Image (tube, rainbow, N blue to C red):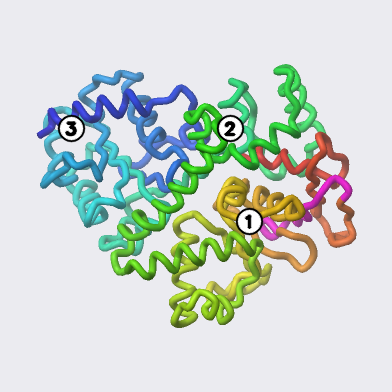
Amino acid sequence: MLDNFKQLSHQFLTIKNSPYKRYLIRSTNFNATRLSLVVGQRGVGKTTTLVQSLLANVKGDLFSDKILYVQADHFQMGSNTLYEIAEEFLAYGGKWIAYDEIHKYPDWSKELKSIYDTFPKLQVLASGSSAMQINKSSHDLSRRAVRYNLRGLSFREYLEISYNMELKSYKLNEICENHARISAEIIDAVNNFDLKIIPLFQHYLKFGYYPYFNELQKNEDLYRITLEQNIHTIIESDLSAIFPSLTGNSIRKIKQLLIFIADSVPLTPNFKKISDVLEVGDDRTLKTYFKHLEDAGLIRSLFKATDKFNRFETPEKIYLDNPNQLFTISTLNDSEIGTVRETFFLSMLPNHRSVTFPQNGDFLVDKKYCFEIGGKNKGFEQLKAAQNSYVVSDNIEHGAGRRIPLWLFGFLY
């Protein structure tokens, strides 16, 4: 059995390895815990992250017997279990094992728990859909596993991949306090490649969030087709694997809901109205569909900034996850560039940050920083004199004072 999986592992390690290392690989020591789960949307680079992590442990040796990559939904799995593969791998000197697409495997949480509890010398890395819930699966892994959410490419990463640049990332407070100096340094670096930051940013908004833009040789039509197909697969395959109770009709309604959101963003939801339009039986079912889309990483909800957050309250606004989705599945026109700007800004904020809808402005981050998003002539009227408040302007290279270029928030990771 093991020989077949080793052969498959070598093939995948060869094909899926990449010289470019994303932010998660650079900033994470996966060996700090015995069980790590990398989750995220389809196409953001989870497989490459697993492969790079394995190879980093053996100095890039593709033939090392100490690493094994296993595609959990591969047809050669047959009657073999994750546990049996781990047991034999460890018996022959294995040390690091990675299971890809783990959410497609029945009882994945049960087997990972057994592997963790039985083989303390084995380092396990797994990847799956962002809709996976380690604390609500059949076996609670929250005390055993560390979950990492892999996002799509930041604007910084897009530039590095496209033009072989080396650019720094910055913390939010650094951008707010020193944006003029930081933007000047970045623009100098970009100008050294005889490039301009604004047109690069405009292209990124349409075609730069998913790493496969580079694999498709920058074919924009093929990129859109691939993205659309991936969205269908997320709903039809990934959600169905995680929530087996979903019926064919439920999947169809979830797709209709996503299109409704895409054509209405930023959507202020009226559940009764949406239920009537989509012919969904009740508000509770509709809210479950919204939750599935958010868990899958396809939409993001923004709630009011209140001291007492109620997780059962209605979101103030709902956005698609990133601008590339907007240009692929939405009927946006040029007059709705404001939605693109807001969607980009929200997509660049690390997931652990608190982002809410403030009384004045568009976004309140960490209950401290207030941002109003707009064009280069956007004023400060809506922000008034609020402390730590900033206007984030599109189509400018440099900012001054409390005016920050929009593109610069693409350097948060």
Tag 3 residue? 5
Q: Which mark is residue 157?
A: 2
Q: Earlier in the sequence, mark 2 or mark 3?
A: 3
Q: Residue furthest front?
A: 221
In the picture, the quarter occupied by the N terminus is top left
Left or right: residue 158 versus residue 234 is right
Q: Where in the figure is residue 197, as x and y percent of width and height?
A: 74, 30
Mark nearer the viewer, 3 or 1: 1
Residue drawn at 45 percent across, 69 percent down: 289
Tag 1 residue? 331
Residue drawn at 34 percent across, 26 percent down: 15
Residue drawn at 75 percent across, 27 percent down: 196
| C-alpha separation, residue under disc 2 versus residue under disc 3 | 33 Å
Asked which quadrant contains residue 137, the reply is: bottom left
Q: Nearer the viewer, residue 331 or 91?
A: 331
Q: Is residue 376 magenta?
A: yes
**Crowd tier of the residue under label 3, counting other residues whose Cα lies within 10 Å: few below 14, some 14–19, many 20 or above:** some
Left or right: residue 290 versus residue 158 is left
**Crowd tier of the residue under label 2, counting other residues whose Cα lies within 10 Å: few below 14, some 14–19, many 20 or above:** many
| C-alpha separation, residue under disc 3 versus residue under disc 1 | 45 Å
**Crowd tier of the residue under label 1, counting other residues whose Cα lies within 10 Å: few below 14, some 14–19, many 20 or above:** few
Q: Is residue 267 above or below residue 162?
A: below
Q: Earlier in the sequence, mark 1 or mark 2?
A: 2
Q: Earlier in the sequence, mark 3 or mark 1?
A: 3
Q: Disc 1 residue type? A: Thr
Mark nearer the viewer, 1 or 2: 1
| C-alpha separation, residue under disc 1 versus residue under disc 2 | 28 Å
**What segment is highlighted magenta in the picture?**
364-377
Q: Is residue 301 magenta?
A: no
Callout 2 secondary element:
helix
Q: Disc 3 residue type? A: Phe
Q: Where in the figure is residue 117, as x and y percent of width and height?
A: 21, 49
